[in-house]
Amino acid sequence: MDEIGDILKKLDKAPTKDTNSDNRPDESESVEVDCDRCSDLGWYTDDVAIDHPDFGRFVICDCQQNNLDEHDNSQLIRYSNLGYLVRFNFESFLPEYSSVPDIQSLIKNAKEAAIEYTTSPRGWLVLVGPHGSGKTHLSAAIANQCIQNGHIAIYIDVPDLMDHLRNSFSPDTAYSYSEMFDRVRNTPLLILDDLGSAYPTPWALEKLQQILNHRFNAELPTVIATSQELSSLDSYIRSRLKAKPLSKIVRLKPSDIGFGLGIIPKDLQDRMSIDSFTIPGEGLTSKEKASLKLAREVSKTYASYPDGWLTLSGSTGVGKTHLAVAIGSQRIREGDDVFFAFVPDLLDYLRSSYTPNSAIRYDEVFERIRNAGVLILDDLGQERGGPWAEEKLYQLLVHRHNLKLPTIITTLDDFTGELGPIRSRAADKAVGYVLNIISKDFRRRDNQ
């Protein structure tokens, strides 16, 4: 039940039939009405006893409520700043078809996560993907669906937001800076598109930090779309976007850099999980069984709480890559930025990025790998040697060692004897854990 003041305010702002007594027909006239309940007045009072709490209260009739809902919805759309994006919805979300199973799966998961978010907008949803992957469509679809559900939402492109804030300082603007800034900071649902496309000035970065920090502290529902890898964003903003459990990161495309580097192929993700890392009941010594069981349990714990480094060492075929892939796959499902690479291939790619016709610059590739959310280096130590390769690996691992960034290494090295500058960091107990897996070769055993 609405109070009469609220009802009259709604009726004042909605197109209703004229209820002025001067315009009412004479009682002797026969008048047809469309609504028998309210006689086309738009409101009525319930026929209840005088001592009933609802006695004398005006109720908006269903015939009028539909008009009010349409009016309120149009008001919300104007407030949302969606403009021509009102045409975007989940039914029309048909991104360019891809035959790559990894991409198909990511797009499907992203759409499901966006739909789920609209049912009860809570926390932060971060959509990550390159230009053309469908981030804007999904962001606008979230806004449109939430508005249909009666929620207030603001959708805005980050560069446009910065322009609006700058323009609000103009003396002839229709709104003040404080009004604009407060509206964005406190709106019930904020949807920011194209985050990280440009931070032209320290002022703009500072304003964005203030907005996100305020919404982070207040845990206000926020949707953010970015084409940048999270590792390349401002560290302060990145820490907010990756904060669990408030924020959920959803990817629309694998985070590769070309030639398959960076991604874990879907067939490997499907085959190599913690659960599928089985320990045979026969053919192994008790020491080998204990080693494999420990490796599985350590990997399972690390997959749930990646902290520091985990180095899996052992001979060929003991399951090092299987466990590394299983950890990476779980972190991908959790929304982490995972970069997976076979070390010899990675060094070959870094060398090729020096060539004049390379599609991507070396410094961009190297920075991407250095700051990956979770870095998996498979078969470290099998790369072709040389001062250049040694120097690049040293630079990469020193950076991640100093920051204690989650890093998984598989290697044939048993870490006996004198340790070089790279191996000494992998073996540093203050940063990580070296797990030496003792077992027979899985591949040879399976083929016997």
Image: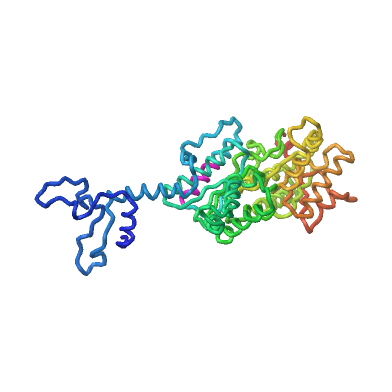
Across and down, in percent, residue 73 comes to 40, 48
Report the side of 29 relative to 439 (left or right).
left
Residue 170 colored magenta? no
Residue 113 colored magenta? yes
Residue drawn 23% across the image and 56% down it: 44
Q: Nearer the viewer, residue 440 or 360?
A: 360
Across and down, in percent, residue 313 comes to 78, 47
Q: Residue furthest bottom?
A: 51
**With respect to residue 57, does 423 lie above or below?**
above
Report the side of 270 relative to 404 (left or right).
left
Q: Coloured how?
A: rainbow
Across and down, in percent, residue 385 comes to 87, 38
Q: Is residue 188 visible?
A: yes
Q: Is residue 281 visible?
A: no
Q: Residue furthest left?
A: 28
Across and down, in percent, residue 135 comes to 57, 41
Report the side of 275 relative to 121 (left or right).
right
| Picture quadrant where residue 53 is located | bottom left
| Picture quadrant where residue 56 is located | bottom left
| Picture quadrant where residue 193 is located | top right
Q: Residue furthest front?
A: 172
**With respect to residue 102, does 154 lie above or below?**
below
Region in magenta: 109-119
Residue drawn 75% across the image and 55% down it: 404
Q: Nearer the viewer, residue 247 or 308?
A: 247
Secondary structure mostly taken by the magenta-highlighted segment of the chain: helix
